[in-house]
Image: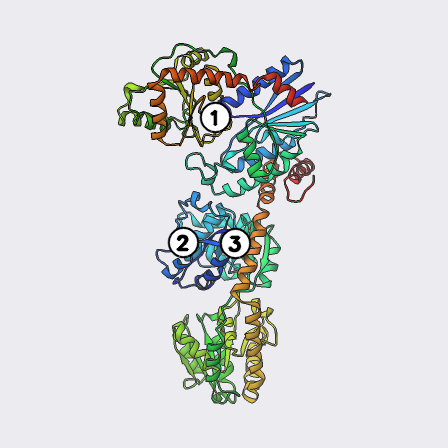
Amino acid sequence: MRILIATVKIPFIRGGAEIHAESLETALLAAGHQAEIVQVPFKWYPPERMLDQMLACRMFDLTESSGTKVDLLIGLKFPAYYMRHPNKVLWILHQHRQAYDLWTHPLAGDMIQYPTGPEVRDAIIEADRKLIPEAKAVYANSKNVSGRLSRYCGIASVPLYHPPPSAGQLFCGESQDYFFFPSRLTPLKRQHLAVEALALTKNPVRMCFAGVPDYAAYLDELKASVARLQLKDRVEFAGGITDEEKFQRYAHCIGVIYPPVDEDYGYVTLEGMLSSKPVITCSDSGGPNEFVDVDTGFVVEPNAASLAAALDALWENRERAKSMGALARQRYQSMNITWPHVVRTLLQ
Amino acid sequence: MKLNWFSPLPPAPTGIAEYTGTLVPWLCQKAEVTLWTDQESWDRVLERYCEVRRFDCRSVPWRDVNRADLSVFHLGNNRDFHDGIWQVSRAHAGVVVVHDLRLQDLFWGAFARKPAGSAEYIRLMEHVYGADGGSAARRFVEGTQSLDSLCLSYPLTEAVVENALGVVVHTRGGFDLVSAHCQASLAFLPFPYPAAPDSAFEVWSARRNRPARPPFQLVLLGYINPNRRIISLLQALGSLPGKSDFRLRVYGPIWDEAHVREKVREYGLERLVTLNGYTPASQLDDAIADADLAINLRFPTMGEASMSQLQVWDHALPSIVTRTGWYAELSDDAVSFVEIDREIEDLRRHLTVFSSDPESFARLGENGRAALLEQHSPAAYVESLVGFLEKTLAQRPARAFTKAAQDAAEGMKGWVSAGVLDRAAESIAGSIGHFLPGSDQ
């Protein structure tokens, strides 16, 4: 089949969504199909710019290319998933959450701060409700994303998990004295909460943050908190690290801490499990809750004291951490989270 | 439904503040309301019904504003009360309630106090009316044309409804004027006025002579500008053979009291006319209750509904009005009309008939009160308004896409031919079709 993957691209930004699209393309090619990614530039401010991009997506003709039919279009992201095609399947990474659950969010709710916010929000909701169901099948990146589609738009979808990009390269090593928090530094990932938790631990718990900031001010705030709470000796900001270094950090940590706000899916959880590490997350963290339980980690209330207690528990009992990590890897392997399964499902 | 209500608030000296003060108790039964004002103070009684917040149009707290479902903007012709509200409404689409149909005073007043205000005013007139509007604005700025004369051809109503999702007007004339150049949904709702309870009405009725007996008490209420036609009234009264049968009492500030007093002397009416100046609302009802006939003329009119006419009707007091603007829409079994081109002649005729058969006029007052009760109840107004707001809200997504498509077409104007633009517009329209409510495309 000739298959196009429709997604968006924020110029000069590369993150999980880009890797996701590339991984899908690789999987489709590996299954013997012709596949390519079609990316639409995306800018979300001021909000009315999104209306232009939504309209633009509706106007592309992707039914054929150079006289040859395109057999299937797989839509991944807003607003690229509005592109028209007679044989369209959606595998939604997430909707534009600032129009939905993040509308009033104190950290992430940016659209609400614009005078045109309400009408663009309504337009996005209306378009999602009308245009998503025109696909022949609707899959979601996770149960969490599927739940939002149902809750806000009344659209049924099937959760379809996929492996993280480096699934085959993650391994488990001897644990050292630190927890690992790999992620973009941004308020929605709540690195600030992890810093506050460190200040409340009974033990001299250490933590390594890896990742670049979405905006420099947040990193400055984090560093200021670390200084104020006298945690300089216990916190490392590793910045952007190579994949190889990331695998090592996963392999040798006591456990992974990942307390984002209502995450869609969250590779970090899966990477931690594949590295045979327990994961500490929060009850409002969304995607991670689909994988973590009392056998494989901690799901705690989203506050510093609860996170601190979980960190102390694993710091004090390394054997427990090790056995939880082993169970986490077993759990992952039992869930059929593979690219061949994804490809078979999307093409069926 | 959560509403933002941007309006002048009592005790601001404007009928629109009074309107909002009247409406709030009814409105808050149907919606969760936040009143927004740029006044420094307001009647604290309002806070018994809803939250009151101050805004500065230069730094609007959008996060708070946007928590409501919809914003309602009240716009009238006075820059002191409406400039800030207009600034917010042009950035944030909501429903605009147009209280005055001719808004040159608002815009020139607002621009005049800015450093490059004249140029901005000319740009606005050009934007709304093209080259003709720009030329007219330049003539005004250069002092060769008056603002009043611009009002009829260039009312600038378009500028206040340009970014509106919906528009509410209080007159049929306003409906026609706005519908001619506005894509937003539009509603005509008769101006609300809370009629007095029967008990108060009975007290007023008991004070009035039936049938009326000489000397007949004529009453003129409100802010007396030249368009209230007091000079014509004095001239008509002065030339009436039976003028000694009448007394005229004027309640309200006068734009040029010395000039009016001179005319009173000129027409020999010193013993028949009393100018009372500003009169508190509490005393005004007594004054109306003691009257036999109200004179409520307007020319020229800016087209708006008249609170004082509704107050006169509340007392079932007969009245004489000019057949123009909102007044022309009134039923002739509820008022007596004066034609613009024979004003004095008609006034003399009506006053003569009144003196010989006052009971024939009393019927007009009774019908006026019936019309007030039937068409102007605040409860019915709020019911209709909230229904309109809900309908407008449902159309907001379609409006957003339509505007995006218009902007796209506008952006292509400079570099494609009309034919190409038409085809592009067709393509964009096809895309929009998928977003419009009820569309199966």
**Residue B414 at x, y percent in the picture:** 60, 36
Give the side of residue A165 with respect to residue A218, left or right.
right
Circle 1 — which element?
Answer: helix
Q: Chain of mark 3?
A: B
Determine crowd level at label 3: few under 14, some 14-19, many 20+ residues with C-alpha closer than 10 A. Answer: many
Image quadrant in which the C terminus of chain B is located? top right
* Residue A163 in view (yes/no): yes
Q: Amino acid at mark 2?
A: Glu
Marks 1 and 2 close (CB-CB < 8 Å): no
| Residue positioned 40% across, 14% down in the render | A249
Disc 2: which residue: B51
Disc number for residue B71: none
In which quadrant of the rendered view does residue A338 lie? top right
Disc 1: which residue: A288
Marks 2 and 3 close (CB-CB < 8 Å): no
Q: Is residue A293 above or below residue B308?
A: above
Disc number for residue B96: 3
Q: Amino acid at mark 3?
A: Val
Question: Is disc 3 in the same subunit as disc 1?
Answer: no
